[in-house]
């Protein structure tokens, strides 16, 4: 997608950023990005950017699940995690899907939306997962899978207090299968600095890096009250990190709003560390393969 910034000041350019962001929330991701890129003022005011979930979960895009000889029940695969949930515009899900390549076509993928307070009640037994109650929570149901790989795409706007999960149905009767490839999950968020940091090669899982990063930000946040000479006497690590951030297009000094975005990024990394999601990407919360009655 190529954007052309207009030099003409429109009515939209004169609106305050919060109103512009509210307008963009009523648009899907493509229209919101087109709206944002229609002028430099809108681009700066709205600040939408894409975050790839594989940054937090590298195994996500390496997953090539294949289920065989299953049944006509619905089975849960994994949750869709919300990154920067207070700043998210939408989440985009896509993958390649095919069945066993012959015979009757029965395979489906689904995405459910369940209140987080209700979520565990659906996970007590396999029988409870397959009740009609959970089927009422679908927000997406794929067409029946083809014999050859086809592309599935779905976009949704996540709501606070909701858990989103990917489900599958292989189909019974013997010989049926379902294969998934090229799984991608991306979030469109209102914070281009966080997005740039997330999509960089910084060691986001390393706790030492997180603490050092935060300490550097605190140092530079005080730079407005101390002179440049005092700043230059900070540790060599501080100066090296400043150079590192500048190399990926993020100058640290002189922009308090930008530094707040960086702190937000570190806090999000810490949140994922605290929940154990970095430690084990295949933990039961994110991969429910242990509940599947299908053979993989």
Image (tube, rainbow, N blue to C red):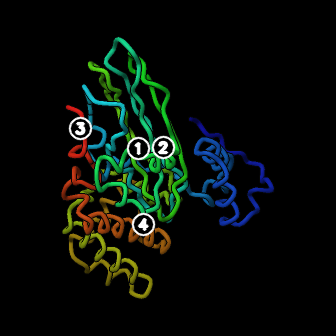
Which of marks 2 and 4 precedes in the sequence?
A: 2
Q: Residue at 67% x, 52% y: name it.
A: 26
Measure the C-alpha gap from mark 1 to mark 4: 24 Å
Label 1's element?
Answer: strand
Q: Nearer the viewer, residue 252 or 94?
A: 94
Disc 2 target residue: 92
Residue 181 appearing in the image:
no
Measure the C-alpha gap from mark 2 to mark 3: 28 Å
Image mark for residue 185: 1
Disc 4 target residue: 117
Measure the C-alpha gap from mark 4 to mark 2: 24 Å
Front tag of 4 and 2: 4
Measure the C-alpha gap from mark 3 to mark 1: 26 Å
Front tag of 2 and 3: 3
Label 1 close to label 2 by CB (< 8 Å): yes
Which of marks 3 and 2 precedes in the sequence?
A: 2
Q: Residues within 10 Å of mark 3 (few under 14, many from 20)?
A: some
Image mark for residue 293: 3
Front tag of 3 and 1: 3
């Amino acid at each position: 997608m190529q954007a052309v910034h207009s030099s003409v000041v429109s009515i939209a350019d004169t609106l305050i950023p919060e109103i512009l962001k509210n307008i963009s929330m009523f648009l899907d991701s493509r229209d919101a990005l087109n709206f944002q890129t229609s002028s430099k003022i809108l681009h700066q005011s709205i600040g939408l950017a894409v975050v790839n979930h594989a940054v937090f979960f590298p195994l996500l895009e390496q997953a090539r699940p294949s289920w065989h000889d299953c049944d006509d029940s619905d089975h849960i695969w994994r949750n869709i995690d919300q990154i920067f949930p207070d700043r998210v515009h939408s989440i985009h899900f896509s993958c390649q899907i095919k069945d066993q390549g012959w015979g009757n076509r029965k395979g489906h993928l689904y995405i459910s939306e369940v209140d987080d307070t209700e979520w565990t009640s659906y996970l007590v037994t396999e029988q409870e997962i397959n009740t009609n109650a959970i089927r009422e929570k679908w927000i997406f149901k794929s067409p029946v899978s083809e014999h050859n790989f086809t592309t599935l795409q779905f976009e949704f706007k996540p709501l606070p207090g909701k858990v989103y999960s990917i489900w599958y149905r292989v189909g019974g009767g013997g010989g049926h299968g379902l294969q998934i490839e090229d799984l991608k999950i991306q979030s469109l968020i209102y914070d281009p600095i966080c997005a740039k940091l997330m999509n960089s090669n910084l060691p986001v899982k390393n706790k030492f890096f997180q603490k050092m990063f935060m300490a550097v930000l605190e140092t530079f946040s005080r730079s407005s009250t101390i002179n440049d000479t005092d700043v230059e006497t900070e540790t060599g690590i501080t100066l090296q990190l400043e150079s590192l951030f500048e190399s990926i297009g993020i100058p640290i000094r002189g922009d308090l709003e930008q530094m707040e975005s960086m702190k937000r990024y570190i806090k999000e990394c810490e949140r994922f560390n605290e929940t154990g999601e970095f430690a084990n990407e295949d933990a039961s919360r994110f991969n429910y393969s242990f509940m599947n009655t299908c053979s993989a």
